[in-house]
């Protein structure tokens, strides 16, 4: 069982990740490059804000910190950037596949295309769409609150939404469903962290276009991963039974 989970996760993540990485290359990546030109133009006007402090870091979470305290490592434009983006996308898809399989196995669900796609759609809602209602995907140079605050809000929102969806869809008791809905609303009632002065280096139309495309790409990644899981798992199961 463990070997099958690992194999299906790796293969499904590789297939879905490569497909979606190609989509990213022609959708969100050009917008990121455009946003970086705005950021670079403003830094050229105020070079003191772009000074390198000697402590490079990689930002892997929601948004990017651009406060001039650290210089962020980033891949060079061209082949290096494409390969790095593809690698991250494939790794993310592998994680999605493992998460889907773990959830379906723990819930004692049959793993087929239909159920895997349903779980993938719920995964996108919990980890993509619902958190984005408070913290939309951001381009470099976008105004944002402190990274730690945004990470905490995102994690709490995603976990509460995932748990709430599971209870709402699996439990019959009306009071449990009502409690699940209330729990999913709480993070949004509290509110996501936002900067006091929402100033951005990126034009609003570019930021809005990027947010929409990013959510579409994330939905495609979840659904492609779910489809691959739903196709590969039964195939490996039949092979195991035939031995």
Image (cartoon, grey):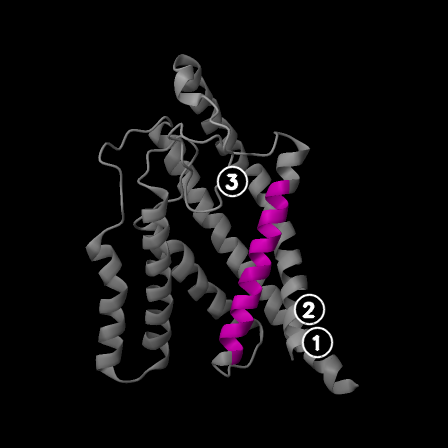
Q: Quadrant of residue 209?
A: top left
In-front residue for pair 210/73:
73
First to last magenta residue range: 84-105
Question: Sequence-wise, which precedes: disc 3 or disc 1?
Answer: 3
Residue 152 appears left or right of 221: left
Q: Position of residue 7 (x, y in %)?
A: 68, 68
Q: Mark 2: which secondary structure?
A: helix
Looking at the image, residue 154 lies above or below residue 78: below
Residues at badges 2 and 3 in contact (C-beta under 8 Å)? no
Mark identifier at residue 236? 1
Mark identifier at residue 7? 2
Mark identifier at residue 58? 3
Looking at the image, residue 242 lies above or below residue 89: below
Q: How far apart are the two marked residues, 2 and 3, measured between alpha carbons?
A: 29 Å
Q: Residue at x 42, y 19 (%)?
A: 43
Question: Sequence-wise, which precedes: disc 2 or disc 3?
Answer: 2
Question: Sequence-wise, which precedes: disc 2 or disc 1?
Answer: 2
Q: Quadrant of residue 49?
A: top left
* Residue 2, magenta (yes or no): no
Residues at badges 2 and 1 in contact (C-beta under 8 Å)? yes
Dot 2, how many residues are within 10 Å of its Cα: few (below 14), some (14-19), or many (20+)? some
Q: Residue at x 24, y 55 (%)?
A: 188
């Amino acid at each position: 069982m463990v070997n099958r989970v690992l194999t299906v996760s790796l293969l499904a993540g590789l297939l879905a990740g490569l497909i979606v990485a190609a989509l990213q290359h022609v959708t969100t990546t050009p917008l990121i490059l455009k946003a970086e030109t705005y950021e670079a133009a403003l830094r050229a006007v105020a070079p003191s804000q772009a000074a390198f402090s000697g402590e490079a870091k990689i930002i892997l979470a929601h948004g990017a910190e651009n406060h001039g305290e650290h210089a962020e490592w980033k891949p060079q434009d061209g082949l290096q950037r494409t390969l790095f983006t593809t690698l991250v996308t494939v790794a993310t898809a592998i994680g999605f596949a493992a998460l889907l399989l773990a959830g379906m196995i723990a819930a004692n669900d049959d793993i087929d295309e239909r159920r895997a796609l349903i779980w993938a759609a719920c995964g996108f809602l919990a980890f993509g769409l619902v958190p984005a209602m408070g913290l939309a995907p951001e381009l470099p140079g976008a105004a944002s609150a402190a990274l730690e605050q945004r990470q905490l809000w995102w994690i709490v929102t995603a976990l509460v939404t995932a748990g709430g969806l599971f209870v709402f869809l699996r439990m019959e008791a009306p009071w449990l469903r009502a409690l699940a809905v209330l729990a999913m609303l709480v993070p949004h009632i509290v509110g996501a962290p936002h900067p006091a002065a929402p100033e951005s280096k990126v034009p609003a139309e570019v930021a809005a276009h990027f947010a929409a495309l990013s959510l579409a790409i994330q939905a495609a990644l979840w659904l492609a991963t779910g489809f691959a899981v739903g196709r590969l798992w039964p195939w490996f199961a039949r092979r195991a039974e035939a031995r």
